[in-house]
Amino acid sequence: MLAYTYTAPGTFTLLEKPRPVLQDPRDALVRVTLASICTSDLHIKHGSVPRAVPGITVGHEMVGVVEAVGEQVKTVRPGDRVTVNVETFCGECFFCRHGYVNNCTDPNGGWALGCRIDGGQAEYVRVPFADQGLNPIPEGVSDRQALFVGDILATGYWAARIGEIHPGDTVFIIGAGPTGICTLLCAMLHQPGRIIVCEQDPARREFVRAHYPTVLTVAPEEAVDFVRSHSDHGGADAVLEVAGTPESFRLAWQAARPNAVVTVVALYDGPQQLPLPEMYGKNLTFKTGGVDGCDCAEILELIRQGKIDTTPLITHTYPLAQIAEAYALFEERRDGVIKVAIQP
């Protein structure tokens, strides 16, 4: 089968590789019907994910059809259309039982697919712990509607949930990339009074205005004053940092009102500094880390009900044979790209 492979630091290559097989009674084999490229894939390419293993097939955003299951798999069967969770988790350890699946203690726990084991920018993928890692797609929900459920939409849903957003709040979202827009959609579910999105790229600010006209947008250099003038208590009640730069990290706490919750789900290329003397009197609560992707069934139901729609994010579609071109488009942000769908 064709598989896009991390062959060396800085290099991905489309290779012919053997089709994966079941290795454990809890595995499932999934035929990939649609995949996508994530910014985290670029982090692997450029060396920002030291745990990534050269030789693995990359990709962790995908949907497909179950081809085979191990004898202990109970929740899916061959022929089921499924989303694939970015997190691999056993469902049994302390962290899984408490809903912290990103911290699963299994050796393959956490972000494994497309990082430490073969992922889904390929024709087939083996999914460990299939009962936890796969969710059946409801009748009437298309592959394109479900494509982001297991990763960036799960991230946005989790960020909005832990951000403690209340009805009437002012929510400040930093970053209008794909994960930022998914976070925006999920923040809307909590009925805030207003949402302000900060984004450097004018084209992405225009994308937000065109698709979500009730949302306010602002450039980073104007953001602190803008948020303060459009909030009731000197800053945002909830801040969701999705951009992942030193400047956006600083902006997150600067734009928050005293006693606000600042949620950081961005992945950074390097360490960030928390300037405690400057923020001491603000009494902020920080929540950080990788997605705990255990809400996929609920997200799929919200999609089925028409309450979440991420299909406008898919601006381009490429066949797997042309995935290198798709990566170049995505990385260089050409032609108004937001997300690229890959068809095996």
Image (cartoon, rainbow, N blue to C red):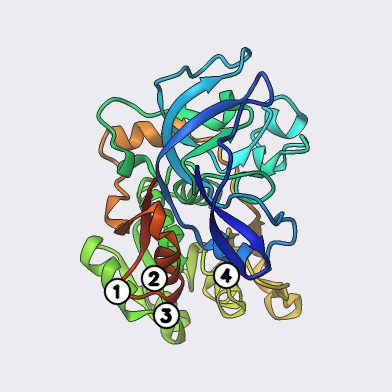
Q: Check the image and name the residue furthest to the bottom.
A: 221
Local packing at callout 1 (Cα closer than 10 Å; few below 14, some 14-19, many 20+) is few
Residue beneath the point at 72% across and 24% down? 92
Inter-mark Cα distance, 4 to 3: 12 Å
| Identity, as a three-letter code, of the amino acid under mark 2 | Leu
Q: Is residue 244 above or below residue 23?
A: below
The secondary structure type at the circle numbered 1 is loop
Inter-mark Cα distance, 1 to 2: 8 Å
**Mark identifier at residue 329:** 2
Residue 217, located in which quarter of the rendered image?
bottom left
Quadrant showing the C terminus: top left
**Cβ–Cβ under 8 Å for marks 4 and 3:** no
| Identity, as a three-letter code, of the amino acid under mark 1 | Asp
Q: Which residue is mark 4?
A: 244
**Cβ–Cβ under 8 Å for marks 1 and 2:** yes
Q: Which residue is mark 3?
A: 200
